[in-house]
Amino acid sequence: MKRSHFAAAVAVLMTLVAAACAKKEAPAPPEQSAAPPPAAAPAPAPFNVVSIGLGKSINDDRTIKDAATTFAPHDTIYASVSTAGAAAKTTLKAKWTFGAKDTLVNEESRDIAPTGPSVTEFHVAKPSGWPVGKYKVEISADGTPAGTKEFEVAR
Amino acid sequence: MNWTEGEDKTPDFSDVVSGSSSSAEAPKGEAVTRTYTVVAGDSLSKIAKKIYGDAGRWKEIFEANKDTIKNPDLIHPGQALKIPGA
């Protein structure tokens, strides 16, 4: 009887030790956070030219009001450049040329720091009248061509 | 203007008036910066007249471009000029 009591006591002791060890080895419950981590702010979209419009007048938001590809000699000609994205500094340039020889009519650039969609307009006029013929305006952003629009001056 | 493409004579675009504006702001710490490229027939006073409407302001353009203009009576087609305060 004593031996069997001893064996039983040992068995109980081993069970308790095993249970204790098992408890220690149990993985800690995952920490519960009060709120899900905040989503990372989306990176601003890179700057790019979306569209170029050409016309005889512009709206208050600098988009083209009166689109045209043929102009009269005394018209003011507008090029409206719609852009998207942000940039700390970008140089938009409009280069206006005439004829097959691409004679320089005017070239003007403007530094901008857009934080989102923006519109930049360039315009040219010639008080003495534009020579009739074919012209084009090339738009570039930081020296990279962004688009060309061709137009004509006719009587 | 009677000039038509195909004639030998190059048309004169020195009286072309230009401008620009943007809904985007100028880069931080910088005034609005415009650059004008000289065309055949231009002079500093002509450019000042075109841009400011006042030929007498040619000195402002000269001062802003002293690094590239040594003689105010000598500018070249294709030369890019900084236009202050435009």
Image: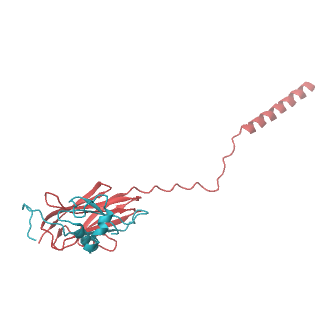
Please identify the quarter of the rendering in which residue B5 is found: bottom left
Q: Nearer the viewer, residue A155 or B81?
A: B81
Image point (64%, 56%), residue name: A34
In the displayed image of the protein, which residue is found farthest to the front? B71
Which quarter shows the C terminus of chain B? bottom left
Count how many numbered circles sit on residues in the image: 0
Image point (8%, 65%), residue name: B4
Left/right placement of residue A50 relative to residue A102 reads right
Please identify the quarter of the rendering in which residue B25 is found: bottom left
Q: Colour of chain A?
A: red
The percent coordinates of residue A81 (x first, y second) are 30, 64
The percent coordinates of residue A9 (x first, y second) are 87, 31
Please identify the quarter of the rendering in which residue A46 is found: bottom left
Question: Vertical placement of A39 versus B50: above or below?
Answer: above
Q: Colour of chain B?
A: cyan
Left/right placement of residue A36 relative to residue B65 reads right
Left/right placement of residue A7 relative to residue B84 reads right
